[in-house]
Image (cartoon, rainbow, N blue to C red):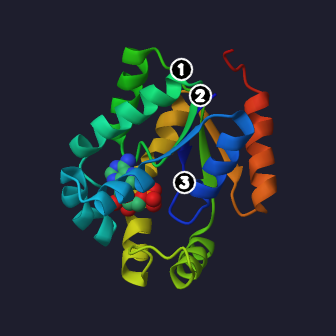
Amino acid sequence: MRLLLLAPPGAGKGTQARRLAQYYGIEDISTGALLRREVAGGTALGREATRYLDCGDLVPDELMLDMVVEAVTEADRKGGFVLDGYPRNLAQAEAAQQLARTHGIGIDGVVLLEVGQDELRRRLLRRGAGAESRSDDNIETIRHRLEVFESETRPLVAYFAARDLLIAVDGEQPVEQVTEDIVDRLAGRAVRP
Ligand code: AMP
């Protein structure tokens, strides 16, 4: 199974990626987590990326590509992946399609988690106050990350719907129900062996 996960910050991307990876026995690749690891490790990429992460802007596309190609091709060899956090804009969507073509990787679906703006803000602020707090979970950055999603990432909904890849599910349901809906919808599609 090869999946892309598309969702605004706070919609439960990380949680659903973990659950889907476990369910299908595939790799969970989070570009946000990969970037945070680069920052923590003080690598050249991490040093470049940190200022974008801290203010909630997208890291420039050209810094993302190598990292994504490496993670995705390796996971593909092991049997599949759920890619959480990429693509985030149209240029990255084109790059992802190109990458899939070049490496013969067929995407089985693009999962969209739909959660209303008020609920997203509530969840992000709750996370910011909790043990899993991240440097970008403060009110200013949250507002900006939600704006970036609407302006940069939201157009991908139509992009993938036009390619008959979009699976939109209600992300405000209990966690288990969200996973079940995704699995049911994927089972209803013609999935490659
Ligand atoms: P996330 O953990 O998915 O919420 O991502 C956290 C931050 O990592 C984002 O606010 C961006 O700064 C950066 N990031 C993650 N994925 C991407 C991507 N595909 N393109 C650019 N920046 C990204």
> Residue 161: x percent and y percent?
56, 35
Q: Amino acid at mark 1?
A: Gly
**Which residue is labeled 2 in the image?**
164
Q: How many marks?
A: 3
> Residues under labels 2 and 3: Cα distance?
18 Å
> Residues under labels 1 and 2: Cα distance?
13 Å
Displayed quadrant of residue 139: bottom left
Do the numbered discs 2 and 3 sit on residues whose CB atoms are within 8 Å?
no
Residue 57 in view here = no
Q: Which element carries disc 1, helix, strand or loop?
A: loop
Task: Give the class, few, some or many, for how many residues have Cα within 10 Å of label 2's Cα (few <14, many ≥20).
Answer: few
Q: Which element carries disc 3, helix, strand or loop?
A: loop
Q: Is residue 59 above or below residue 77?
A: below
Displayed quadrant of residue 118: bottom right
Which residue is at a point 73% across and 32% down the rendered structure image?
A: 186
**Which residue is labeled 3 in the image?**
7
Which residue is at a point 54% across and 75% down the rendered structure image?
A: 124
**Which residue is labeled 1 in the image?**
106
Is the residue indicated by label 1 positioned so its CB lies within 8 Å of ligand 1?
A: no
